[in-house]
Amino acid sequence: MSLVELAVVVVIIGLLLSALLGPLATRVEVRQLIGEQQRQVDLRDALIGFAAANRRLPCPDNDGDGLEDTTVSGPNNGPCSGGTPDTGFLPYQTLGVPPVDTWGRLYLYRVDADYVLASSPGSPPSGAALDLQDTSGITVQDRDESKAAFNLTTDAAAVIVSLGPNGYGGTDLQGNTIAVPAAPPTLVDEAENRNGDLIYVARARTVPHVTCSDSDASVTFFCEFDDIVTWVPASLLKLRLVEAGVLP
């Protein structure tokens, strides 16, 4: 074969490989996303199981060692300790669950302060104990086609966040953090899931675009978003605790 013919063959093989590997990579990515969603359902169940056994939800892990950080030892009342007591990493060792998400980063975890105070069976409702009167201020939002935010829930007892394939702001088991892009466009919805406040975003995945906005309807594209968010509904938690005899 001449060099020209060989070059043509190489190009054809390259095109064929690209055509085959593209769909394969997509299938792998879809499997990862579905697997991560199921894993978070298992994590939610682990939190509910912990509450049934300990009459409260666990505090966050503030230092990445997998253990909840409280101001007291043992399965007693909180409150949680640390710089921002009710937000941090998921305490995987305390719960006995896998330490990281599908992409190797620690899960973020936010819990409402009322739900880390152990219930007192037979006692009247109290702000110092988990009971049926408790309400949460944690909100999870989505966005509609006009990019307006709307609430999926305003009463999440706890939230679990995987920062997805891009992992921006995520931390691995060795304490290494993936930097958040410094240049525009600003990933508003992803930033919302990292800032530790009471609002989280759970919306459809969107790919990167040079010109984008998460809130401006005049801009065609959403900005990059691949976070996966799961929450523990306060109503579900209370129902499970009633069924377990923890709450009256």
Image (cartoon, rainbow, N blue to C red):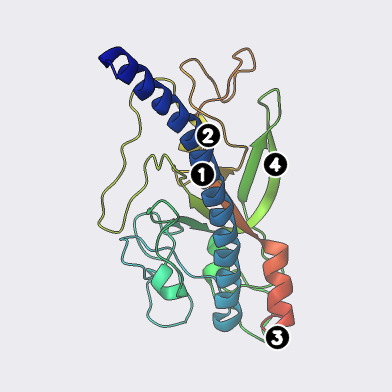
Among numbered discs 4 and 1, the one appearing first in the sequence: 1
User: What amino acid type should be assigned to the residue bearing mark 2?
Assistant: Asp
Dot 4 corresponds to which residue? 151
Pick whichever, 237 or 20, lies toward us: 20
Dot 2 corresponds to which residue? 189
Among numbered discs 3 and 1, the one appearing first in the sequence: 1
The mark closer to the camera, 2 or 3, is 2
Is any part of residue 227 visible from this angle?
A: no
In 3D space, how far apart are the residues under numbered discs 2 and 1 (Cα atoms)?
21 Å
Dot 1 corresponds to which residue? 29
Residue 83 in picture, x, y percent from top left: 34, 55
Is any part of residue 67 visible from this angle?
A: yes
Instruction: Find out whether the residues at labels 3 and 1 contact each other: C-beta distance under 8 Å.
Output: no
Residue beneath the point at 54% across and 37% down: 23
Q: State the SS at label 2.
A: helix
In 3D space, how far apart are the residues under numbered discs 4 and 2 (Cα atoms)?
14 Å
